[in-house]
Image (cartoon, coloured by chain):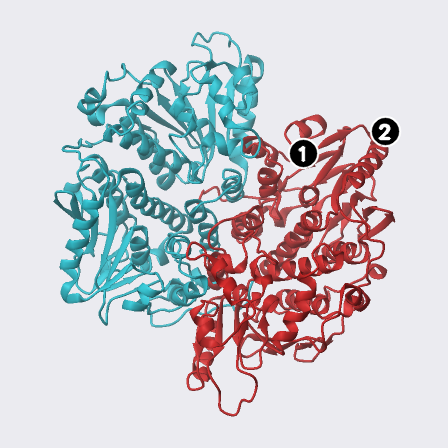
Chain colours: A cyan, B red
């Protein structure tokens, strides 16, 4: 078992996946190493997965977009005989602590979402080509693809056997995607989700569970045909050459603090707090897109996104007792705006678009992070454009008002850019400003402020920060807030934040993280699933779970 | 502690509420009897409430609509000094089993929703006139009102102290209504919901938590003024005389079975099943609305709705181990259609509208019921119009195909009416047919079938039933389904059904029963709230809860 779960990997270190490239078509082979589990105590049989398998998959999808922009179709296949994927490893789940189960599912959900994002944002279409059994999380992986092919034979099926077999839900999107994406009629979905053995062939097509059932003998041929068709139909512009995502520059201190180039995470364990400092650019924005491509993974916008993403994942999984994240920025707001402007000013340029969309994903990850988060808009800070989004992703924000004694940094400001009006939508398909002012005001009115460095009073008037405090009140107020927040029940915080952060409309994505996940988490606490005689614990013993039959 | 929680009551038996009527304005006084708790072990101090208080409130709201259609404005006030309502009784919550907590919250949520439904559907506007402390569930009651007045003094405030004080959520709508209905900015909502002492006067108005803050000296005068204004502005037609809702004709057998006039509930405890039989009308439909009014609570449509509502509530709260409900109908489909036609054919008539809207509420109650439900469309059944809605409220339906040996009842049919296309919307604001075919087909195409008695094959072709079975398969298939369904983990069923039943779009109402409730139920299982040292158990001991600070 690793001391620290590391979300950084690269193809040379993969144990569970490999990718073959053939022009616009990539084939993603799932070939899980039974002995490559992240923790001890289970074997990853039948292409079952744990967090380690998903960390690699996340890396694959990310590199596909940055390193292989020529790819238009990704065919997902199994390298095993007679099994596509058996889903999340049950022994791993049975042995995992509640917090690990929940965090694992969240990351898995985010990775599934990247399949759909790849097609929607970059025109990279994921296709599931299923031969053999495809069950539980395996079918949930297929559901995240945008075309599902199933071999029409006696052993190949799709199934969500979680409910009858394990007394838990198909919780990484399964229930929601079956109804919301595949549009399976709810009563047929009910039959499907309570049938252990799943559904095969033509019936699977009829019910909408897969797009086509293909005779085994012709399977490879039809897969190749579809790949060619989808590639030909793709409107994704041709890109000859991607960029390389090199290793991050990152060092961990003994106390758990982490330093990247543009991100510093300082751990205050006694206060149960992580202080996250984001630095502004260290140089001017590239002159043009060619210069940006030349900078590649060293360009500010991409490098910062990668560092922040890694820091968020690290803190989420490895530092579960740091219940409060405080986000600060320091740097030149104009420089942030200049770097963002190059990205936003060249829509249609593949790398600019990829960087913007990556920021969208990183910010979404923050939105669904189960930690209390606050932003401190201090003097010398650079909450502008993309970094200002953080102010509306966190639970609340405090801003310094007027000069502070002995503080010579430039006065705290918040600056809106065009980017705050649509470049980084949340999971609910609204911008963070729209969500913030949902049903309350027309966000477009704020466009008048674009480019204006708003000092405290103006930022408060515009509704962009929660509270402004002057030199007299700042220290005490902040101290009281930090102490109080860190003293509350973490569970109540999680529930409260999950509700308040997503006012108003819901989408399939928010329903997965809201409705589905919340019910799954409830079930993950119930003896019928996780108790000594619960189904998850008894799995593989040949004995069924024993249930308290009370309905609640 | 009562053997059986009874949802039937009437004003002569109220212990906690009283209503004064003054033309179009009613004043609803909350005056909870400390010693009137439904169970032993707690006192209902400070206008705190338990399920018993809410059962009376539910009765008040229902009678207001049927017995007092002259009422256009309902002013909700406290009869206690210095306190409006302290919310759900914490000692009751601390002592209650998980299932009771969850069921209590569900019923409370439904009752809160009836406030909003009364204005939306009947033009009866609920106004909260708050003097003194209004905390937790007390403020959630106020949030359900459509205008909130708060005394502007040093002791009156609104608060949701659940998170900081009790480590649970404001789970009966609070978090959702603050953002979705009151449109409180999410960061201000975060501050509000983590501030034990709440918010007073002008700030409460500024943040959108209340509509007006009124000086104490002028409070009664301004309340009377508002009542008169709202009554004058009301578009509700004048109705001189309501009808009386008399006691239900109901008898319980020793085995827990219940018989009403048109509803029979047979309990099969060994099979963990309740068989619910709904009977068709025993007479012809009233000739016209005057005849309907003359029949009053004895009219088929109203009487059946009341009986079914009571049966659902009884089974939910008193029979938690009956995890499977099987719904059957027997009777003449044409008679059902005729009775429904009078109701639907006279929109704008107050009693027709009230009966239709009551059916909407009863059907919604079934939608959110945490039981596996199936409908059996047998020979002799009358699944037509309003009763056909049950087919799409339950999880699945089975229909008899062709003749069965020795069965002389008329062949099983399903008949659509105009009512299935908008008269009884679900909580998601869609019809059950729209939800069923969401994203899949245009439901209006089905209008061609209105009035047609569809036999099995035609009903299956139209997608109206899950499965059709002939005489050879029926018995075995149904037996296997019933046995299997009753053997699954009830928790997994609850989670699965809560997801599959609400495909697609969400509304404030579905978000309350989905996102908010699911998170609350999760928290209701966590030691930080309900463990021995949890906040709910420690409440009133002077010691704070002790928390495991891990974030999940």
Q: Which quarter of the rendered picture does the C terminus of chain B lie within?
A: top left
Q: Is residue B489 left or right of residue B425?
A: left
Subunit ID for the residue under disc 1: B
Please, what secondary structure does the residue beneath circle 2 have? helix
- Cα distance in 3D space between marks 1 and 2: 23 Å
**Residue at which label 1 appears:** B197
Q: Position of residue B275 (x, y in %)?
A: 58, 76
| Front residue of this view, candidates A125 and A306 | A125
**Residue at which label 2 appears:** B217
Residue at 17% x, 38% y is: A70
Q: Are marks 1 and 2 in contact (CB under 8 Å)?
A: no
Extreme residue toward the bottom, this view: B406
Q: Are marks 1 and 2 on the same chain?
A: yes
Residue at 51% x, 31% y is: A436
Q: Which quarter of the rendered picture does the N terminus of chain B lie within?
A: bottom right
Please, what secondary structure does the residue beneath circle 1 have? loop
- Label 1: few (<14), some or many (≥20) within 10 Å? some
Extreme residue toward the left, this view: A22
| Front residue of this view, candidates B450 and A172 | B450
Corner quadrant of residue B273 = bottom right
Q: Position of residue A213 (x, y in %)?
A: 25, 64
Compare marks 1 and 2 and give the one earlier in the sequence. 1
Relative to A435, say whether B552 is above or below: below
Subunit ID for the residue under disc 2: B
Q: Position of residue B493 (x, y in %)?
A: 48, 64
Q: Is residue B228 left or right of residue A525?
A: right
Corner quadrant of residue A204 = bottom left
Residue at 45% x, 48% y is: A511
Relative to B4, say whether B406 is above or below: below
Report the mark closest to the observer, 1 or 2.
Answer: 2
Q: Position of residue B201 (x, y in %)?
A: 72, 28
The answer to whether residue A264 is visible is yes
């Amino acid at each position: 078992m690793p001391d620290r779960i590391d979300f950084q990997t690269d193809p040379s270190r993969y144990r569970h996946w490999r990718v073959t490239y053939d022009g616009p078509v990539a084939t993603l082979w799932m070939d899980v190493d039974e002995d490559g589990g992240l923790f001890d105590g289970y074997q990853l049989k039948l292409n079952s997965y744990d967090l380690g398998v998903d960390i690699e998959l996340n890396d694959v999808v990310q590199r596909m977009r940055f390193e292989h922009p020529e790819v238009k179709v990704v065919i997902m296949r199994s390298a095993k005989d007679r099994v596509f994927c058996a889903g999340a490893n049950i022994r791993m789940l049975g042995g995992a602590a509640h917090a690990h189960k929940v965090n694992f599912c969240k990351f898995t959900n985010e990775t599934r979402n990247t399949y759909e994002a790849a097609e929607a944002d970059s025109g990279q279409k994921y296709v599931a080509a299923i031969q053999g059994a495809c069950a539980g999380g395996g079918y949930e992986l297929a559901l995240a693809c945008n075309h599902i092919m199933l071999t029409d034979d006696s052993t190949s099926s799709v199934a969500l056997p979680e409910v009858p077999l394990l007394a838990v839900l198909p919780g990484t999107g399964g229930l929601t995607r079956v109804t919301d994406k595949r549009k399976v009629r709810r009563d047929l979905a009910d039959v499907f989700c309570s049938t252990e053995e799943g559904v095969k062939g033509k019936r699977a097509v009829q019910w909408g569970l897969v797009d086509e059932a293909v005779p085994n003998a012709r399977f490879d041929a039809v897969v190749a045909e579809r790949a060619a068709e989808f590639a030909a139909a793709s409107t994704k512009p041709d890109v000859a050459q991607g960029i390389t995502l090199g290793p991050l520059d990152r060092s961990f201190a003994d106390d758990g603090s982490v330093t990247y180039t543009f991100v510093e995470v300082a751990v205050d364990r006694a206060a149960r707090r992580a202080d996250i400092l984001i630095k502004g650019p260290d140089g001017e924005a590239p002159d043009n897109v060619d210069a940006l491509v030349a900078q590649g993974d060293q360009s500010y916008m991409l490098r910062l996104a990668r560092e922040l993403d890694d820091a968020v994942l690290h803190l989420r999984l490895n530092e579960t007792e740091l219940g409060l994240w405080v986000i600060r920025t320091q740097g030149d707001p104009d420089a942030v705006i200049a770097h963002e402007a190059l990205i936003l000013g060249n829509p249609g340029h593949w790398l600019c678009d990829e960087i913007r969309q990556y920021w969208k994903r990183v910010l979404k990850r923050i939105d669904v992070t189960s930690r209390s988060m606050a932003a401190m808009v201090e003097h010398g800070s650079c909450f502008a454009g993309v970094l200002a989004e953080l102010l509306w992703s966190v639970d609340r924000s405090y801003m310094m008002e007027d000069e502070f004694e002995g503080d010579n940094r430039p006065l705290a400001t918040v600056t809106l850019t065009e980017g705050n009006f649509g470049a980084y939508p949340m999971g609910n398909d609204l911008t963070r400003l729209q969500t913030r002012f949902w049903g309350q005001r027309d966000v477009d009115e704020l466009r008048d402020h674009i480019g204006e460095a708003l000092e405290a009073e103006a930022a408060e008037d515009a509704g962009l920060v929660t509270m402004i405090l002057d030199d007299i009140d700042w220290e005490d107020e902040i101290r009281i807030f930090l102490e109080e927040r860190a003293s509350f029940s973490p569970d109540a915080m999680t529930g409260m934040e999950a509700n308040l952060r997503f006012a108003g409309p819901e989408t399939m994505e928010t329903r997965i993280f809201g409705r589905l996940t919340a019910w799954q988490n409830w079930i993950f606490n119930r003896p019928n699933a996780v108790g000594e005689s619960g189904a998850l614990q008894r799995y593989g013993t040949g004995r069924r779970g024993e249930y308290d039959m009370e309905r609640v």
